[in-house]
Image (tube, rainbow, N blue to C red):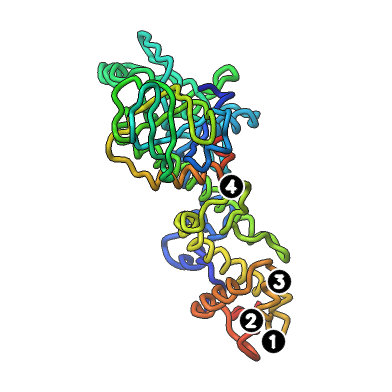
Amino acid sequence: MDTLNPAAFVNAELLRMHVGRRVRAVIQVLRNDDGSITGKSTDEQELVVKGHPSSPPTTFVEVIGIADSNRTIQAEIWTNFGDNFDVSSYNTICQLANGDFKHLFI
Amino acid sequence: MYGNSQFDGSAAFSGGGFMPSQAIPTADPSSPAKSREAQGLLPLTVKQIREVFQASDDKANFLIDGVSVNNVKLVGLLFEKTERVTDVSFVLDDGTGRIDCHRWVQESLDTKEMELLSNGTYIKVHGHLKGFQGVKQLVVYSVRRITDYNEIPNHVAECIYVHCYNTRTRKMQDAPQATGQLPNPAVNTPSKGYQPTSSNHSQFSVQPIVDGMKGIDKIVLNYIEQPSCIGKENGIHRAELAKQLNVPEHKIMEAISSLESEGLIYATVDEFHFKSTVNG
């Protein structure tokens, strides 16, 4: 990440607005396949994250990377967010950070 | 009776031994936000800092949303940690930008605090914003690892809230100064692009509505107290108030009922016309 390429907070709904750009999202891990992880976004939809986490993922993981499509992210940075995470708060700030208050973030 | 709705300190205390050095009327535009917030801690994003830094000629004193920036709080990922003898420098990346940080280490406690942190971890920092040779920097007082990751959306929410609060406070202070046509109080910010769902929007706008009421009361009262309204025998019709102030009529009605219960205005010929209880 650098100053010229910030990462927008996204859920599944907002991901499509940022295809091709750097995004960050928190997902609840559902399946751990070879080379990718399938997870549930904060707005309850399935997303696929390509790449390898640096350590075994916890229930919630934040990924920062490039949005490949409406449903996939090519991850660069993985951060374990533990097993207790308030998904609805995160979802709300995704909406605010892309809506009325976009100018504070991107 | 008491001349106006605002507490006049010098009038209340004159005649006794105690004289306040300065009577500060409640509608003083310069006092509330700046004096209260001058020593406070502002949660910010790197983007907000970068923007104000680029726009500001004076690289020593910054204002964000009208509030002077002294102590700031940021949350983000730590990168490029470099340990030296007397200080540790690193870069904080919060997803909106990167900022250089400096932590002076004088005691072993400080050194230990910094040793625990490695590149790629989420941290929260408290520090002071500084410009050095044209480059913005954060002189950091405290760095702590994030252990509960709910702090990240919490920090984002705080940034949004404080931004709203400061921009609305400024609008409210500007409003009573103008006569006649006034801007709509910022209770519902116009949406640009993606519209958040209505339930979430109301969750965040409960606070502004409460404060907005008082602002609207003030605006309505100021208008009714104008000589042109005092001169009218029957006072002013509430529909005209709505039109002149560019405020929805139901909000005018709410303001009127609260001002009436305070004894600041009264209904004249019918329930639609109101006058101020102050006789100019």
Horizontal side of B26 relative to B107 (left or right) equals right
Which sits earlier in the primary sequence, circle 4 or circle 2? Answer: 4
Rounded to the nearest angstrom, the CA distance separating label 2 from label 3 is 17 Å
Q: Which residue is mark 1?
A: B234
Q: Nearer the viewer, mark 4 or mark 3?
A: 4
Which sits earlier in the primary sequence, circle 1 or circle 4? Answer: 4
Asked if marks 1 and 3 fall on the same chain, the answer is yes
Rounded to the nearest angstrom, the CA distance separating label 2 from label 1 is 7 Å
| Kind of residue indicated by mark 3 | Lys
| Kind of residue indicated by mark 1 | Asn
Q: Residue at x 32, y 19 (%)?
A: B114
Asked if marks 4 and 3 fall on the same chain, the answer is yes
Which sits earlier in the primary sequence, circle 1 or circle 3? Answer: 1
Mark 2, secondary structure of its residue: strand
Closer-to-camera residue (B109/A71):
A71
Mark 1 and 4 residues: CB-CB less than 8 Å, in contact? no
Q: Is residue B52 above or below residue B100?
A: below
